[in-house]
Image (cartoon, rainbow, N blue to C red):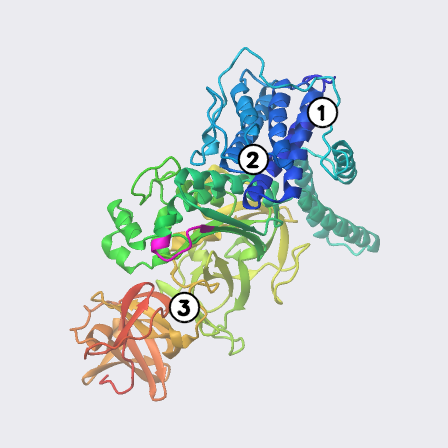
């Protein structure tokens, strides 16, 4: 006999293998509930329990062996057709799995099975096994609670300590594992031995800390490789050696990263049991579908997303999916649908949790946000539905009518967002009233090593994560450059770049980071177009660093570097603009930009979807509008296809000319009309600066003076005609709000 403490290595191997077997048991039991006649699945469950029982006896864990023996006896009755699978049987088996998992945790932490005695559970398993297969389940023996279909299995606690031995036979400690061959099958022991030999020959278990150390050393090797390649030499032997070291380092880095990758099914496989137990406790019917479980992710990230995903799944069952009767009234299937999906996308892993429940009441979220002082009523009225939903991630925010044992205390979604963002990920939420909710989580493949674009702004070098970079756009400038190259347009407080018909907001990186003072009319440099979550914007830099060792080109002037991510100090991390730091081949330290932090800090327009998630997000310019606010506060829109420029001029530049106003543009003049005046008002108050939206047409240009540029949005409804209203062509839903579309036809009295 091998005692529990005689060989810690073997015991640890037993614990890992048994835990994996329990995870498989959860999945198999869920599948067996859906297909009770699946004999192969039942045989697999029997063999798994038998394996745990046999190994328990080998290591001298008598309580574990006695409990699994009772479960094996029940499964044998099922396999032999002496019992029918019902809620009472499955509830008892789930209780056994939970008890076995609890004993394993105690062994892992204390080295022994602990003081708890699961005699009551063992007796209940025996009593259930004695029931008649063709009659209703027999009542439980006196003093032994039976598993009820309405009772959540997860809440059944271990029985108190009892001095007496369990009233079921126990496997002798020194005996070999018992073999109970299934009809028509080979020996269980032979199958298990064959399986073990295959696993042992193809894989080994390595401590995660050791793998992490290897990856850290590879990171240092990458830095040394970059330094070696930065040395200028003409010696062919040195160049050949450097080239060889570079190739080997790249291969080693790729292999080392792969050793940390694990299928995300290690997280997903626990959710069928979780969903089942929650559905029972909430009185709901839920069908879970899982797709993309083979998508790989860094082991450390898998552990980091486990709790956030669990909370999202619990929320979907508790708050999202309606009770069966309510779903039937709404014309939905009584069984709710919950989907988990994972897939690779642009160098990241995207995980979606989608339900077909009642969705989120945006109005309730808006009212709660106003009540909590998170936003003013006036500001909330101008925010899109997607932006309103982001308040759900605020600390303590909850619209639940009542607090349940599952959720509703407002202490979860903010933690979900914080934990996901702590590993460089993002989380966003989309909801359709009455149809359901989708929460989308995006995380990097790994945090240790990543490709980045090294850029220069003023006197500083900075890194932009390559996964977010879409393209590089050179600015035209007044002193050269092809005519097709774009320029920065718009106003001081809302600069934009027109790219293939789209107007994208831009950030001047040097001004934003305080590297140098504000510069007017910037028309030189490069714009890095990036995407964060569902939003695209441009970052204006001076230039892209050339010739970084180990890089790969993006366009003709780009240089990607493989950088090793290092943590930054608390002072810098609190700024919220940097995701880490790295060391380049020349020894210089470069900060890695946190693009999400920049997006939040600059409050760039966030209403336009970049990936087509909105119904009309891929519409042509004929369906897009520039949304503005007049100086008197009216929300208006202008058709994007008519807009040629956005300009910022001084009041002195606007010249009166009879009963109208003009502004000089180049060698000619453009008529200027105040938006409020066009709508029949008195016009906005005189200001030192004037914001102009220049519209083009077959008969020339017209400039509309507005108070504020809000966003570029796709139409969400057909243009609705209104009663005769001066200057209004109709009403549109833009960003979830009714918006007046200005009549910019040439027939108007400008």
Of residues 454 and 414, the one nearer the viewer is 414
Which segment is the magenta one?
328-337
Q: Which residue lies furthest to the left in this view?
A: 682
* Residue 332 position in % (x across, y down): 40, 56
- Check if residue 334 falls in the magenta segment: yes
Q: What element carries label 1?
A: helix
In the rendered view of the protein, which quadrant contains the N terminus?
top right
Q: Do the residues labelled 1 and 2 touch (CB within 8 Å)?
A: no
For residue 10, which numbered disc appears in the image? 1
Report if residue 359 is visible in the image: no
Provide residue 656's location: percent of width, then percent of height.
Answer: 21, 81
Please indicate whether residue 282 sits to the left or right of residue 529 in the image. left
Task: Please state which of the two labelled residues, at mark 3 or mark 2, is closer to the viewer.
Answer: 2
Q: Residue furthest right?
A: 237
> Residue 287 placed where, x, y %?
49, 48
Q: Name the residue under label 3.
A: 521
Q: Earlier in the sequence, mark 1 or mark 2?
A: 1
Instruction: Give the mark, 3 or 2, whose residue is nearer the N terminus.
Output: 2
State how far apart marks 1 and 3 are (Cα).
71 Å
Q: Quote the CA–CA distance across marks 1 and 2.
A: 41 Å
> Which is nearer the N-term, disc 1 or disc 3?
1
Q: Nearer the viewer, mark 1 or mark 3?
A: 1
- The residue to which callout 2 is attached is 133
Which is more toward the observer, 159 or 649?
Answer: 159
* Left or right for 635, reference 319: left
Residue 636 painted magenta:
no
Dominant secondary structure (helix, strand or loop) of the stretch shown in magenta: loop
Name the quarter where the C terminus is drawn.
Answer: bottom left
Element carrying mark 2: loop
| Furthest residue in direction front, as rendered | 135
């Amino acid at each position: 006999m091998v005692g529990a403490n005689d060989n810690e290595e073997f015991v640890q191997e037993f614990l890992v293998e048994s835990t994996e077997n329990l995870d498989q048991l959860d999945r198999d039991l869920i599948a067996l509930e859906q297909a009770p006649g699946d004999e192969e699945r039942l045989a697999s469950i029997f063999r798994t329990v038998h394996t745990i029982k046999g190994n328990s006896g080998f290591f001298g864990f008598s309580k574990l062996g006695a409990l699994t023996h009772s479960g094996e006896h029940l499964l044998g009755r099922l396999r032999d057709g002496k019992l029918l699978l019902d809620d009472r049987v499955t509830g008892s088996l789930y209780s056994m799995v939970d008890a076995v998992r609890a004993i394993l945790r105690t062994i892992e932490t204390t080295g022994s099975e602990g003081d708890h005695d699961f005699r009551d559970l063992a007796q209940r398993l025996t009593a259930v096994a004695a029931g008649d297969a063709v009659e209703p389940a027999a009542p439980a023996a006196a003093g032994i609670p039976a598993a009820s279909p309405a009772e959540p299995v997860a809440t059944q606690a271990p029985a108190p300590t009892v001095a007496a031995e369990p009233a079921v036979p126990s496997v002798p400690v020194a005996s070999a594992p018992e073999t109970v061959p299934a009809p028509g099958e080979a020996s269980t022991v032979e199958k298990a031995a064959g399986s073990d030999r295959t696993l042992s020959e193809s894989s080994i278990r390595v401590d995660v800390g050791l793998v992490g150390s290897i990856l850290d050393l590879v990171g240092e090797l990458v830095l040394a490789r970059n330094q070696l390649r930065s040395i200028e030499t003409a010696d062919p032997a040195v160049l050949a050696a450097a080239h060889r070291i570079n190739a080997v380092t790249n291969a080693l880095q790729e292999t080392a990263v792969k050793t940390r990758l694990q299928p995300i099914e290690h997280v997903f496989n626990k959710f069928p049991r979780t969903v089942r137990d929650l559905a029972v406790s909430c009185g709901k019917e839920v069908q879970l579908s899982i797709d993309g479980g083979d998508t790989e992710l860094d082991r450390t990230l898998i552990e980091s997303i486990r709790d956030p995903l669990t909370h999202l799944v619990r929320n979907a069952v508790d708050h999202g999916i309606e009770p069966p009767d309510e779903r039937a009234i709404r014309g939905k299937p009584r069984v709710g649908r919950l989907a988990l999906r994972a897939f690779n996308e642009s160098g990241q892993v995207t995980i979606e949790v989608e339900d077909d429940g009642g969705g989120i009441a945006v109005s309730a979220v808006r009212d709660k946000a106003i009540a909590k002082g998170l936003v003013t009523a006036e500001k909330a009225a101008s925010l899109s539905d997607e932006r309103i939903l982001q308040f759900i991630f605020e600390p303590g925010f909850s619209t639940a009518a009542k607090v349940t044992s599952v959720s509703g205390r407002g202490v979860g979604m903010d933690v979900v967002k914080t934990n996901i963002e702590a590993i460089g990920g993002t989380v966003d939420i989309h909801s359709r009233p009455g149809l359901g909710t989708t929460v989308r989580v995006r995380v990097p493949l790994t945090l240790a090593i990543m490709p980045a674009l090294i850029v220069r702004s003023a006197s500083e070098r900075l890194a932009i994560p390559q996964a977010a970079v879409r393209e590089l756009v050179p600015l035209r400038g007044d002193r050269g450059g092809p005519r097709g190259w774009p320029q920065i347009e718009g106003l001081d407080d809302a600069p934009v770049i027109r790219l293939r018909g789209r107007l994208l907001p831009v950030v001047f990186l040097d001004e934003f980071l305080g590297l140098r003072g504000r510069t007017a009319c910037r028309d030189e440099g490069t714009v890095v177009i990036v995407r964060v979550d569902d939003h695209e914007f441009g970052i204006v830099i001076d230039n892209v660093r050339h010739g970084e060792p180990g890089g790969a080109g993006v366009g003709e002037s780009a240089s990607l570097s493989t950088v090793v991510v290092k943590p930054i100090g608390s002072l810098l991390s609190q700024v919220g603009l940097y995701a880490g730091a790295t060391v380049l081949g020349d020894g210089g330290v470069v900060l890695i930009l946190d693009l999400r932090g920049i997006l939040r800090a600059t409050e760039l327009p966030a209403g336009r979807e970049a990936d087509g998630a909105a119904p009309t997000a891929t519409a042509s310019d004929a369906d897009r509008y520039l949304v503005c606010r007049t100086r008197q506060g009216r929300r208006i829109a202008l058709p994007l296809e008519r807009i040629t420029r956005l300009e910022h001029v001084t009041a002195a530049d606007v010249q009166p000319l009879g009963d109208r106003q003009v502004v000089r543009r180049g060698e000619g003049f453009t008529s200027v009309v105040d938006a409020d005046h066009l709508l029949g008002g008195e016009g906005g108050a005189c200001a030192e600066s004037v914001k102009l939206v220049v519209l083009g047409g077959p008969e020339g240009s017209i400039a509309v003076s507005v108070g504020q540029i809000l966003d570029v949005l796709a139409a969400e409804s057909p243009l609705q005609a209104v009663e005769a209203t001066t200057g209004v062509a109709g009403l549109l839903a833009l960003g979830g709000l009714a918006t007046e579309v200005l009549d910019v036809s040439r027939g108007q009295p400008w």
